[in-house]
Image (spheres, rainbow, N blue to C red):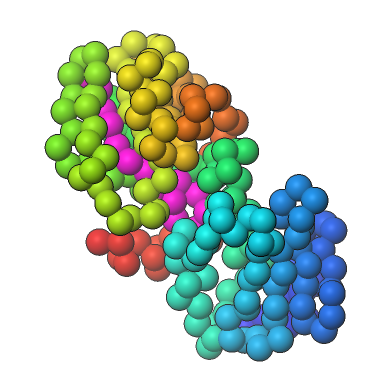
Amino acid sequence: MIMDLDEQITEILDIFPGSFLKKKAVMEVPMFPSANIQVDLRKYPKRPKIIIPKKFQKAFGDFEYFLPTYKKWNRNHPIQISQILKALQYGFETIAGKKVHFSEKILNDICYMAKTAYPKEFFSLLRIVNGVLHEYVLAPGTEASGISAVFFPSRIRGDRTLIATCHSHPSPNNHPSQADLNTFKKFFINAIIGAPFSINTLGVYNFKGEPIPFEVHLSPPLDFMEDEESFF
């Protein structure tokens, strides 16, 4: 059943406290400290127009790259706009290093790959999909041993969805080394998983090597199934 405009607006008001109608079918939704995004629904069921404040546009630019479901909006089957906005919020928090959002799937994949690679280190890039880190990509040419993994960033170009790295340490230590910090500078988010390779031994850091809280989502706001084929 397709939600009508009033239902979409009511749900946004319920899920995002502080939201309000600025004028007919144009909403202000809090998403940044002391700043709102604007959601223009006047042409609904066509795709809503989402406008972020100018002072944040430089940092986040064209946010559609991490929201493929929004990018592929179908006016004949419009989805819940509140869930688009929740995914957008997760993406902003992750890229800004405020809180990193993982799907349960990617955490399971990371644990499995780290255990499989042991006693060598495992290294991968992580892709953001609909606001959460959801897929891993094995970087070509990566060289791994029991004490380090060497990665060549120049071999991965042009994919803005690869915003994070993850690698394993064969020991329980999940803190970054100096070599790790040098790699961290090139990505928004960096994760290290130590033995015995579970969520309890995962450390997440920003590009400076500062620890960041993270959250794992069993059911992220948007379904991934329709989007995964577009990446491969």
Is 76 a magenta residue?
A: no
The magenta stretch is 118-134
Q: Residue at 65% x, 69% y: name it.
A: 51
**Is residue 141 in sight in this rendering?**
yes
- Can you tell which quarter of the image residue 125 is in? top left
Q: Quadrant of residue 167?
A: top left
Residue 169 drawn at (x, y percent): 33, 18
Q: Is 59 on the left or on the right of 125, as rendered? A: right
Q: Quadrant of the C terminus?
A: bottom left
- Left or right for 128, reference 116: right
Question: As rendered, which of 130 and 62 lies closer to the eye?
Answer: 62
Question: In the picture, which quadrant includes the N terminus?
Answer: bottom right
- Viewer-proximal residue among 86 and 51: 51
138 versus 35 height, above or below:
above
Q: Give percent across and percent down for residue 107.
A: 42, 37
Residue 128 is one of the magenta-drawn residues = yes
Tally of numbered tags: 0
Residue at (29%, 37%) from the top-left corner? 124
Report whether 136 appears left or right of 68: left
154 above or below 115?
A: below
